[in-house]
């Protein structure tokens, strides 16, 4: 495959997580209570309600302040928004680079930064989920793990 074809493939692969996180971000902005309420339950350690002996050991980690929770949620939404913008911009710029209108080095930096931001957001959810024991309950971590792996795969594709 020639260089143009490779750039088109990289643009497509970059667009997919960009579209996914952009949709999630739009939902978090338009319907914040859907995810914000689940985040509040995770931060309050509700997943540990059935295992009081473990909850007692880590109860100091609980965040129950509505103000702190809203602030954390807003930071997450901003990080998601930044990742979405960088991925979508990186994908579009990779397409332009395939046509020769834009320098490939600069474009690749935007796409890589977007993929790193996407991976960072997803990995942060894994780390936060571990800290707040959300894997003990119904919330799980599968989506965040898969998104982290998706971000890493996107980074690898962009680097080769």
Image (cartoon, rainbow, N blue to C red):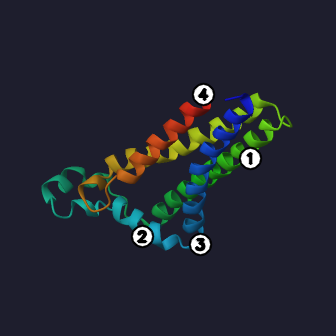
Label 3, label 4: how many angstroms apart (C-alpha)? 35 Å
Label 4, label 1: how many angstroms apart (C-alpha)? 17 Å
Q: Nearer the viewer, mark 2 or mark 4?
A: 4
Apparent side of residue 45 relative to residue 114 in the rendered image (left or right) = left
Q: For the C terminus, which image quadrant?
A: top right
Label 1, label 2: how many angstroms apart (C-alpha)? 34 Å
Q: Residue 95: x percent and y percent?
A: 75, 42
Q: Look at mark 2 in the image and give the residue it sits on.
A: 37
Q: Earlier in the sequence, mark 4 or mark 1?
A: 1
Q: Vertical placement of 60 versus 99: above or below?
A: below
Apparent side of residue 66 relative to residue 24 in the rendered image (left or right) = left
- Tell me the tag on residue 30: 3
Label 2, label 4: how many angstroms apart (C-alpha)? 38 Å
Q: Look at mark 1 in the image and give the residue it sits on.
A: 92
The number of discs equals 4
Q: Look at mark 4 in the image and give the residue it sits on.
A: 159
Q: Nearer the viewer, mark 2 or mark 3?
A: 3
Q: Residues within 10 Å of mark 4 (few under 14, many from 20)?
A: few
Is residue 109 at all visible to an observer of this figure?
A: no
């Amino acid at each position: 495959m020639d260089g143009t074809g490779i750039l088109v493939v990289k643009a497509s692969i970059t667009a997919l997580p960009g579209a996914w996180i952009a949709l999630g971000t739009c939902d978090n902005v338009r319907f914040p209570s859907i995810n914000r309420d689940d985040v509040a339950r995770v931060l309050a350690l509700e997943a540990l309600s059935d295992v009081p002996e473990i909850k007692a050991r880590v109860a100091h980690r609980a965040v129950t302040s509505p103000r702190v929770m809203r602030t954390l949620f807003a930071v997450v939404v901003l990080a998601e928004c930044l990742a979405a913008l960088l991925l979508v911009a990186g994908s579009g710029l990779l397409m332009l680079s395939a046509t020769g209108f834009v320098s490939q080095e600069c474009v690749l930096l935007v796409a890589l930064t977007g993929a790193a931001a996407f991976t960072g957001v997803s990995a942060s959810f894994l780390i936060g989920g571990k800290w707040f024991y959300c894997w003990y309950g119904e919330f799980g971590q599968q989506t965040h793990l898969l998104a982290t792996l998706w971000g890493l795969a996107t980074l690898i594709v962009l680097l080769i």
